[in-house]
Amino acid sequence: MVRQLLLLLLLAGPVLAGPVAAGSEAPRRVVSINLCTDQLAMLLAAPGQLISVSDLAQDPRSSTMVEAALAFPANQGLAEEVYLMKPDLVLAGAYTARATVSMLERLGIRVVTFPPASSIADVRQGMLDMGRVLGREAASETMLADFDARLAHLPPVPAQRPTAATFAANGYASGSRSLAGEIIERAGYHHLAEDLGMPMGGFLPLEALVMADPDLVIAGDPYPGASRAEEVLHHPALAALTGGQTVLEENDWVCGLPALLDATERLAATRAGAAP
């Protein structure tokens, strides 16, 4: 019935106001349908302004803000359910289901799409952009100032850096020119992807990883159960690397959030603890 109603509304044309003009009133009913916008909005939104986040925000395998997310009704990113919440703003990611975004826009609901952060510069810009969209510029500027202060106090990068590599399901490795790559570099490691000619990331054969023998392997955290894609993470060859260290890739650096500095600081501490 709801789907039929939406189809009728689409045929009739937009029924709600389009994008809000600059300088207009801040949105009062905000729905987020993307994990990364969920968490950034939870950090910046005014009390009562954010009315729903995606179900991924409440999943500890994906989110770093599960406890905060449990205070909000969860959505599955479906146009029907979002429409019935009567939002005046929907936050989405660049790769959020395009059918949902398209339908909401055709219904006249304002949708703002945030690209994924591929560098710390992108993370900084994302904070400011979210602050503007929510009408919370002062809060976002304060967040950015705190972020920059922590960034400036990271331990200095040593002249001689150990090598680190990422290794996830299906043998995927992040590139040296990625957010993960910059985190690794800021933590004082040299990213193996730079040596292997993988600036944008891609498939890293286990054999190539073993032959490179990095000092640290940052592996994906396997999901419960059995998955052929994750079998490679349990291969005994990983444990046999002479570096002898493996840490789990955590949710802190999945999205462009201040929490990525927690991951950077932990990696820097791991490096310092391994130093002779």
Image: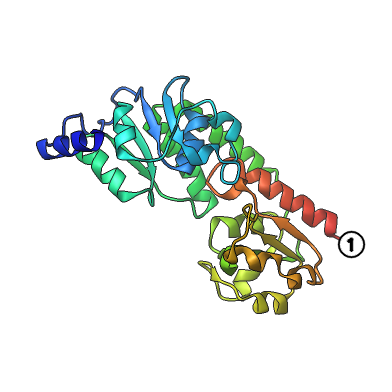
Measuring from the top left, give residue 238's x and y in whole percent.
74, 69
Amino acid on which the number 1 mark rests in the picture: Pro
In this view, 119 is above or below 17: below
**96 sits left or right of 108 in the view:** right
- When asked about the image quadrant of residue 49, the answer is top left
Q: Quadrant location of residue 183? A: bottom right
| Residue 9 in picture, x, y percent from top left | 16, 34
Percent of width and height locating residue 204: 59, 73
Left or right, 236 with respect to 205, comes to: right
216 over 252 or under it: above or below: below
The location of residue 199, given as percent across then percent down, is: 53, 69
Q: Residue furthest right?
A: 276
Q: Nearer the viewer, residue 122 or 116?
A: 116
Q: In this view of the protein, which residue sits in the foreground, 2 or 56?
A: 2
The answer to whether residue 138 is seen in the rendering is: yes
Residue at horizontal 52 percent and vertical 38 percent from the top: 57
Q: Residue furthest left?
A: 12
